[in-house]
Amino acid sequence: MTKPLLLNAVVSALLVALGIAAYDRWVLRPALVVGVVDLSEVYRAKEAEFTQLLTQTGSESERERALALARSFSQRLPAALDELPRECGCLVMVKSAIAGAPNSRDLTPLLRRKVEQP
């Protein structure tokens, strides 16, 4: 009589342990990862590039090109910010809003590549 009860308890404990391990692996740990983006750095770099293009050029076509670059950047930046959480599977926050996150990933280089001119 005690052998089936013991077997039942061992199987139940094993299933509970496997369930907790699976929950930790696929639900809890990915939720603890935070992606960090230094948005001001990306913005300042593009602003400097835009300013340099405007100050160096004298022709109207070059100015139009600089304005097209700024317009393109302003359209690609929100789209790139929307894509980041889906790609990394994590919460994405602006770097200046975080005091410290032990499980953070810097996604600034990825954002920079996304907003660069194709």
Image: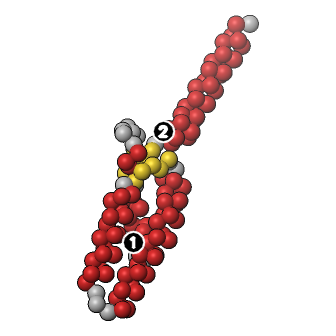
> In this orientation, which residue lies closer to the viewer: 63 or 82?
63
Q: Which residue carries the number 1 mark?
A: 116
Examine the rendered structure and indicate whether residue 26 appears above or below residue 15: below
Residue at figure coordinates x 43%, y 72% from the top left: 73
| Res 105 seen here | no
> In this orientation, which residue lies closer to the viewer: 29 or 61?
61
> In this orientation, which residue lies closer to the viewer: 27 or 12?
27
* Label located before the other in sequence (1 or 2): 2
Could you say whether the residue bearing mark 2 is in a helix, strand or loop? Answer: helix
At which x and y percent is residue 29? Answer: 50, 38
Q: To which quarter of the image does residue 112 belong?
A: bottom left
At which x and y percent is residue 111? Answer: 41, 61
Q: Nearer the viewer, mark 1 or mark 2?
A: 1
Q: Badge 2, how many Cα within 10 Å: few under 14, some, many 20+?
A: some
Residue at figure coordinates x 41%, y 81% from the top left: 67
At which x and y percent is residue 57? Answer: 28, 87
Residue at figure coordinates x 39%, y 71% from the top left: 116
Q: CA distance from mark 1 to mark 2?
A: 29 Å
Q: To which quarter of the image does residue 16 belong?
A: top right
Residue at figure coordinates x 40%, y 87% from the top left: 64
Residue type at mark 1: give it. Glu
17 relative to 97 in the view: left or right: right
At which x and y percent is residue 13? Answer: 62, 20
